[in-house]
Image (spheres, rainbow, N blue to C red):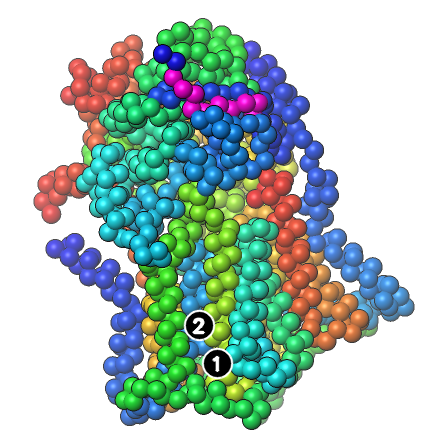
Amino acid sequence: MMKKKKFNISLINTYRSYIFLLIVLIFGAFSDNFFTMFNIKSLLSSTSLYTFIGIGFTVCMIAGHMDLSVGYMATAGALVVLGMHTLTGLPWAVSILIAVAVGAVVGILNGLLVTKAKIHSFIATLGMQYVIRGGMYIYCEGKEISVKGDYGLTDKLSSVPIKFLPFNVLFIITLICVIGFSIMLAYTRFGRNIYMLGGNLETAWLAGINSDRATIIVFMLSSMSCALGGALFGIFQGTATPTLGEKGIAPLMIAMTATIIGGTDIAGGKGKVLDTFISITAIVAMFSVVTSLLGKFEYQILLIGFVLALCVFYETLLKYIKQKEIGMRPNLIIKYHEETGK
Amino acid sequence: MTKVNENTTAAKSDSRKTEINKALVFFDKAGVWILVVCLMAIGFIINPSDYFSVGNIRSILQAISLTGMCCAGLAYIVYSSNMNDMSLPMTIAISGMVSIQLVPFGIVVCIFGGLLTGTLVGIINGFMIGKLRANPIIWTLAFNMVLSGIARVAWGGSQIYPDVVAGGNEAALATAETFNQLARTYFFGGSVSLMMVVMVVMFIISYFIMTHTKFGNQLKIVGTNYETARLSGLNVVRIITLSYIICSFCASVCGLFYASMRKIGSYDNGMGYDFSCLTAVLLGGMTLLGGKGSMVGVFGGVLAVGMLNNVMTLIGISTFNQYLVTGIVFLLIVWLNTKSARKLGRA
Amino acid sequence: MEKKIALQMKNVSKRFPGTLAVDGVDFEVREGEVHALMGENGAGKSTLMKILAGLFNDYTGEIYIDGNLCRLHTPMLAKEHGVGMIYQELSVARRISIVENLLVGRLPKKNGLFYDKKEAIRQAKELLERVGLGYLDPNKPISEISQCEAQLVEIAKVLGTNPKIIVMDEPTSALSSEEVQRLFKIIRNLKEQNLAIVYISHHLAEIFEIADTITVMRDGKKIKTYPVSETTNEQLIHDMVGKSVKEFYADRESHIGETMMEVKDFTRWGFFHHVSFELHRGEVLAICGLAGAGRTEIARSIIGVDPLDAGTIVKDGREGTYKDMTMAIKNGIGYLTEDRKVMGLALTQSVADNILVSIIDKLSRGGLYNPKNHGKIVEEKIEELEIYPPQPNRLVNALSGGNQQKVLMAKWLATDADVLILDEPTRGVDIGAKQTIHKAVLEYAKRGNGVILLSSDLPEVVGLADRAIILREGYITGEISGEEITESSLLMAANGEGKHVS
């Protein structure tokens, strides 16, 4: 009987991001305009930027690293794509490619700092944060860049291709990326190797996985995902400023929070991109619900803080309690039941 | 008999010794102070007449004093291998806000209340991380959000001003004025400010605590290897909790001066301090592995950040573009730190 | 019939910053041969094998596998040439499932891109079957299986790569004797398949049981190679140490006094039940049992690091339990941990800091404390335990394994505790250091203190202990004392046989 109870708790923990989303949706039902087509559409499209950043952060965390540069990378992506299109006059496709390429370069630099210079990823990406920020200001001279007249792609991104579904093109691209990364992580050899990197770097290296190359690729994927997300977001908004990553709750914080609520282990080796995506959706939905029910922006941050704190507290407590049971011998537990009659 | 044998084998292994890179040893010892000296030289070359003037030195010290206060506390967290205290910004903000809210009760209550708030944050962090072993980054991040939420909800998302809080009350207005003057008190004809004195005193006390007290020496072992410390009979829970309390206390001192300087209590008072302080501490030679570095180094790190900004301003690099230089210098120094530590077997 | 040479290393050297770890070694292994590689700690045998496994890309010399010159610069290249290595420290990822650990780096593919989960599980089951772990669910993460099982998984992992040459670096350190026999069966099986096996171990008995040829190394150089039939224990030790060891454990007289500590009805459910024993002054009491019998757990519960469900300790007229190590030390109990790198020492701090760590509380005056004022204690201990080089400010990292262990011992001797619990005090330590530590232990006991010795090194128990209690699956099953303590009586009792088992 005791065992059954425990089983349920672990199940709740496994699906906690879904439960979080469910709770938010139930509260949403009490709000008048939550379940309207328009609201859901705008909600889903506003998850896009966070999701791309969340993908990057999660992939890095599974590999046992932290990428703090994701937020500014997204901002840089938005600035580069708009700059290339508006200032330099390149077509959209090329501009997006250049933005993603910039992401790749930053990612490779991050990876090199971590693998070759052997700097802790937390520090390396912290430094990279400054570099990206500085580079960005130099590129745009501290000014806002916006689409000038050419709103074709912006309209296309916000159009709804399938009727009756509140999915605009931006959200569909996001979804495709989430699914793509999920499949990559779960079903390909490279994906499984990423988990192994986070699980035990030495094991991976000894087993002949080229761990340096894999780590560099992980950082590259992370930065590319953020750059793409930023680029799409910039086009969708039609404008980009160098302070995109600083206003309100920074996108980095949202991505971090969502990754942890999604159940990714901070030490690496465990986690899912899909769960991160679900928690991002839940967080964004919660913002909307809170604003419409309580009418105040202030409660958003309080609630998200509490949810995150709760997750961390629960996990910590579980580990604290479990620690005492590690190594119990099954044959002796039988004796325990015999002796105490429990 | 055994001893003789030991010595001969060891002597043999000594003869197998290879050269150790002298430059790395030098760097390991001097660390960030090399950078400080370089920056001084550059500053002197650019602006030989004014660089060592009282005015310029004062402006450098004044600019770093707030960060410096935080770093004097944050160093304990990094030293104890708990990476970073992400709740620094809200500790700074909330202690400033609480003390401004307490302005009507007199300056003593006001300062005491602000410091107590910060200490309380430290106790909670210390309990979660020291006792329950929560992941330090994630927990302090979550707690920062909770605090941020509390601050926003409690004050309705608005900023507070000392003189507004004081209302029409004469005595309270006087207190508000005293509070605002905290960050504007100068000694010796304006060459030394109270903030600088507080910062330097905090560093001196921190240096003393780290090297000459029981707590500091035990913290060194806790930072190097938690399990070893625990199994050597050190009270690890108390030590880690204490280091969080010190950190939060330092942050709340910074918060008081911050609020006093801006004459505003706001939830974005300490924004960005989580990473900017960590940058200075790491620049000062501490590593995320813990147990390495010293307060002298951290002070050097803080000083280097201030001087770097000063020199860049002298050269004429704009504030925004300074990020790039800061980032590159930071990565370079950390890389050298890591490299020398690894080559000398310290990492 | 001469068998084919599978592996030939010619004039191989490897330099670390500061030392030449392997110095011009020639080494040969033939097919179908178990070749034991022996030597003290730091003799360079692990380094030599790590070169073979491709961990270093800057060794010098030539390595021939099957007669072909190979460059083994990454683990990948070594694997391609058929070298499989079982490492001393486990190299498994604890949060990852058994399947992926077993097949790491070579997960089966399907459709060119994806990995074939079904096939992976099938292969994993087969491998687990080979090492006798067929009952495990391969989807479980490693963190949910025991240390012994993890060690066997590690062996299965290497078997799965179908190597031509297998290197085993202390594979039995976490195994019980039954599992060691199972491993030997596997090794004999591999021998028949004409594989070359290099076996590193400190257990002489194991070597004489399984090896065909022995190579001895000392100070990074090869000393000698001979067939196992042509050598003896004494000869081997002589070659390893470079001096003859007539009687490793000298006779000693023990002066056993009154009872100083009593453990009453100690129980931690699921780990050990109803454990009671007494310790007398001047006595070395060994707690013996197979790996996993619960020795370390008892020690950790005594000092209050792990929880306890029932039982008390009576010492110095006080009955109760200790809530943490601080309290245990105050009551005069010290605990030397089994793993010096993870739990014992602060490796990146100086020798002085490490020796003084447990007595900071005692030495400090009103919260003030400066390590510089206590250099005398450190120097005393360095001299007593012959720590070399005798520099208090040297980092522990820069000492050899044996000297690190001496520092750990010095730390506990410095506390002036009157009961010391020694958990594997000489594991993985060279013979010289072992002798010094043993001498220190006996000295300590002679001064009227009590020692509780937890060791899986049977000669050590025989040489040091006055009395041994036998622990089997969490229960005390017997007691042996005085002259009756021999390796065979201990082994029999630990396995639940013989006259000493009640």
Q: Which residues are magenta?
A: C3-12
Residue of label 1: A233
Q: Amino acid at mark 2?
A: Phe
The answer to which quarter of the image holds residue B43 is bottom right
- Residue B139 highlighted magenta (yes or no): no
**Apparent side of residue A292 relative to residue B322 in the rendered image (left or right):** left
Where does residue A194 sit, x and y in percent of width and height? 41, 55
Q: Chain of mark 2?
A: A
**Apparent side of residue C63 relative to residue C3 in the rendered image (left or right):** right
Where does residue A53 sit, x and y in percent of width and height? 46, 71
Residue at 58% x, 50% y is A116
- Relative to the observer, which residue lies in front, C207 or C352? C207
Residue at 34% x, 35% y is C162
Confirm whether circles 2 and 1 share one chain: yes
**From the viewer's perspective, is residue C129 above or below residue A163?**
above
Instruction: Give the position of the N terminus of chain C as an image quadrant.
Output: top left
Q: Amino acid at mark 1?
A: Phe
Instruction: Give the position of the C terminus of chain C as an image quadrant.
Output: top left
Where does residue C12 sit, x and y in percent of width and height? 56, 25
Where does residue A272 sit, x and y in percent of width and height? 35, 63
Q: SS of the residue at dot 1?
A: helix
Residue at 32% x, 49% y is C108
**From the viewer's perspective, is residue C502 above or below residue B204?**
above
Q: Is residue B249 visible?
A: no
Magenta residues, dominant SS class: strand
Residue of label 2: A52
* Crowding near the residue tagged with mark 2, few <14, some 14–19, many ≥20 C-alpha atoms within 10 Å: many
- Relative to the observer, which residue lies in front, A38 or C66? C66
**From the viewer's perspective, is residue C256 above or below residue B212?**
above
* Crowding near the residue tagged with mark 1, few <14, some 14–19, many ≥20 C-alpha atoms within 10 Å: many
Dot 2 or dot 1, earlier in sequence = 2
Q: Is mark 2 in CB contact (under 8 Å) with mark 1?
A: yes
